[in-house]
């Protein structure tokens, strides 16, 4: 797996080289990132497809860890993704969602709420010439969404830079 930390520092953490220490001090890498990377690297022996992915960062929200990987990497993991998520959940004591890096909020949201389907997305133009996206989801699927709706909207904004509103039809 490709990460911002060198493999020697990952095995010897918290003893790290100066270069990796600068990344940790600047906030480029968090404690959660290190913890998730170490768990995924331990799983590389059982799942060789993990060697080909690039870890970007991890976020934690209400008992859910969002693992952000480079574009195209979740397709490589797809055959074994459920097993990887289950084993990582046991190690980290938290649900795991793997999300591809994207500027498109629809792709990020789709990965976060899978298997719930998005019914549609509308663009709402605001008076200050900015816009938001309104995402429509079936009201029958509301209980299957893993996070609080406001927190889900915040995560999508943090990852894509676009504001969304989720509504149930």
Image (cartoon, rainbow, N blue to C red):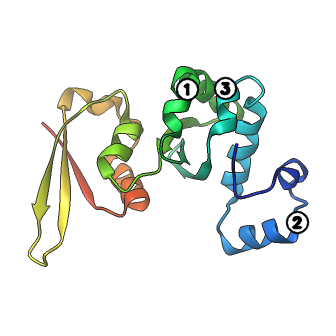
Q: Position of residue 45 (x, y in %)?
A: 78, 27
Q: Nearer the viewer, mark 1 or mark 3?
A: 1
- The alpha-carbon separation of the residues under discs 2 and 3 comes to 29 Å
Question: Residue at 65% of width from left, 38% of height from top?
Answer: 52
Tag 1 secondary structure: helix
Question: Residue at 13% of width from left, 75% of height from top?
Answer: 129
Q: Nearer the viewer, mark 2 or mark 3?
A: 2
Crowdedness near tag 3: few (<14), some (14–19) or many (≥20) residues, C-alpha within 10 Å: some
Give the quarter of the image for residue 81. top right
Which residue is labeled 3 in the image? Answer: 87
Looking at marks 2 and 3 on the same chain, the residue that comes earlier in the sequence is marked by: 2
Q: Position of residue 72 (x, y in %)?
A: 48, 40
Q: Is residue 78 left or right of residue 50?
A: left
Residue closer to the observer: 52 or 4? 52
Which residue is labeled 2 in the image? Answer: 17
| Above or below for 96 versus 156 | above
Q: Position of residue 96 (x, y in %)?
A: 55, 36
Report the disc number at residue 156: none
Which residue is labeled 1 in the image? Answer: 81
Q: Is residue 92 visible?
A: no
Q: Quadrant of the C terminus?
A: top left
Looking at marks 1 and 3 on the same chain, the residue that comes earlier in the sequence is marked by: 1
């Amino acid at each position: 797996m490709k990460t911002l930390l060198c493999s020697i520092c990952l095995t010897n953490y918290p003893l790290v080289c100066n270069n990796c220490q600068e990344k940790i001090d600047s906030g480029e890498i968090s404690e959660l990132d290190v913890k998730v990377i170490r768990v995924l690297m331990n799983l590389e022996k059982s799942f060789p497809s993990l060697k080909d992915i690039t870890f970007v960062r991890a976020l934690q929200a209400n008992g859910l860890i969002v693992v952000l990987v480079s574009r195209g990497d979740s397709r490589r993991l797809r055959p074994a993704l459920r097993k990887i998520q289950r084993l990582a959940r046991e190690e980290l004591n938290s649900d795991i969602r793997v999300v591809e890096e994207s500027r498109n909020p629809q792709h990020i949201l789709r990965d976060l709420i899978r298997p719930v389907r998005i019914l549609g997305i509308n663009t709402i133009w605001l008076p200050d010439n900015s816009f938001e996206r309104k995402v429509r989801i079936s009201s029958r699927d509301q209980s299957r969404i893993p996070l609080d709706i406001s927190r889900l909207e915040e995560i999508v904004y943090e990852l894509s830079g676009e504001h969304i509103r989720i509504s149930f039809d």
